[in-house]
């Protein structure tokens, strides 16, 4: 089976899964909730070499074991990949590849792994969700690599995986895909943040089109205001000015700044508002903590 066939099979199964599991195809996909609604037992623990494990019904499943050492993006993708094994009726699978983006399209992948990998992309990035993300960043099509990075932040996916899927959706040409995959996410983060960003952190750019949206963050992530002169009017106390942010009024006073760093004390959800010069209404959005899951499914946040 080649990758084109795998994607055709996976795309159809993802649509069925969205329907069966009551997934809103217009935005961020809650893959952990999907596992629960699919009656798949979920667990997460640190594992040195594995992305995840799918246990088929005949092996005391269905269940998935996720690597708790992965960041939230990689763990979400792994959860969707394992759900793909379940939806396709595959047998028990141990997913050992720790850098899937580098082997995208590698013909050595077994057919079942190709289908599960393709399913993860279609499940987490359905076309309506991608269109919603494009509207949120204010464009109809992705025009520069920064747009792919921002779509990835909105949908909770990897930069490379998002670029590949945008090509699958015919929103990028093959040439664009090849060129954009050469761009390092680290360089995009520096451009968005206006300076260095923590290595494992994500950068979330907030502009007027983000009004009313939910921004999903984890510890060390940066929330950056993209409009000239914009500043936070209100912000959760668990967010603070980045330590090396230049020209800020005082360390810890994020409301006087155009950027804020998420600390590990932030949990759950909280609202934030932004003042933008020349705009009568405050820009309002919701921050939601999304951290890698650990332990048994019953302890995972909703």
Image: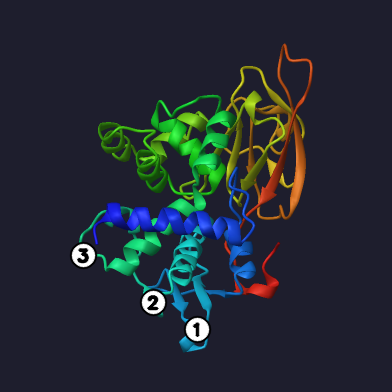
Q: Which mark is residue 184?
A: none
Q: What element carries label 2?
A: strand
What residue does disc 3 label? 108
Q: Residues within 10 Å of mark 3 (few under 14, many from 20)?
A: few
Foreground disc of the pair 1, 2: 1
What residue is shown at x 42% (from left), y 53% (from top)?
11
Quadrant including the C terminus: bottom right
Closer to the N terminus: mark 1 or mark 2? 1
The percent position of residue 290, horizontal first and vertical second, equals 63, 54
> Where residue 93 is drawn, which disc sits there?
2
Disc 3 is placed on an element classified as: loop
Q: Distance between the residues labelled 3 and 2?
A: 16 Å
Eyeballing the image, is 276 above or below 290? above
Of residues 241 and 145, the one nearer the viewer is 145
Dot placed on the residue nearer the N-terminal end, 3 or 2: 2
- The residue indicated by pointer 1 is 57
Image quadrant in which you'd find residue 37: bottom right
Task: Say left or right for 279 vs 28.
Answer: right
Crowd rating for badge 2 (residues with CA inside 10 Å; few <14, some 14–19, many 20+): some
Between circles 1 and 3, the one closer to the viewer is 1
Give the residue displayed 46% in from the left and 81% down from the top.
56
Sequence-wise first label, 1 or 3: 1
The location of residue 253, given as percent across then percent down, is: 73, 34
> What's the residue at 60%, 43% (across, down)?
26
Pointers 1 and 2 in contact (C-beta within 8 Å): no
Q: What element carries label 1?
A: helix
Residue 258 in the image: x percent, y percent? 64, 28
Farthest residue, direction left: 107
């Amino acid at each position: 089976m080649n990758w084109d066939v795998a994607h055709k099979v996976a795309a159809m199964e993802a649509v069925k899964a969205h329907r069966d599991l009551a997934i809103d195809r217009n935005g961020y996909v809650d893959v952990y909730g999907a596992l629960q609604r699919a009656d798949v037992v979920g667990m997460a623990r640190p594992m040195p070499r594995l992305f995840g494990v799918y246990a088929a019904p005949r092996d005391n499943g269905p269940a998935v074991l996720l690597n708790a050492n992965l960041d939230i993006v990689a763990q979400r993708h792994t959860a969707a990949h394992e759900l793909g094994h379940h939806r396709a009726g595959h047998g028990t699978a141990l997913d050992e590849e720790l850098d899937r983006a580098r082997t995208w399209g590698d013909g050595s992948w077994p057919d079942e792994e190709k289908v599960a990998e393709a399913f993860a992309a279609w499940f987490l990035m359905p076309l309506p969700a991608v269109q919603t993300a494009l509207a949120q960043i204010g464009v109809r099509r992705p025009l520069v690599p920064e747009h792919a990075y921002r779509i990835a932040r909105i949908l909770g996916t990897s930069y490379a995986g998002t670029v590949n899927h945008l090509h699958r959706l015919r929103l990028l040409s093959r040439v664009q895909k090849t060129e954009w995959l050469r761009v390092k996410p680290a360089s995009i983060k520096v451009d968005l943040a206006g300076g260095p960003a923590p290595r494992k952190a994500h950068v979330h750019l907030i502009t007027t089109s983000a009004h009313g949206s939910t921004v999903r963050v984890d510890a060390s992530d940066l929330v950056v205001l993209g409009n000239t002169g914009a500043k936070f009017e209100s912000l959760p106390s668990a967010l603070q000015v980045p330590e090396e942010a230049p020209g800020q009024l005082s360390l810890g006073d994020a409301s006087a700044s155009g950027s804020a760093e998420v600390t590990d004390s932030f949990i759950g959800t909280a609202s934030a508002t932004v003042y933008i010069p020349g705009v009568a209404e405050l820009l309002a959005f919701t921050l939601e903590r999304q951290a890698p899951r650990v332990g048994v499914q019953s302890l995972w946040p909703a």
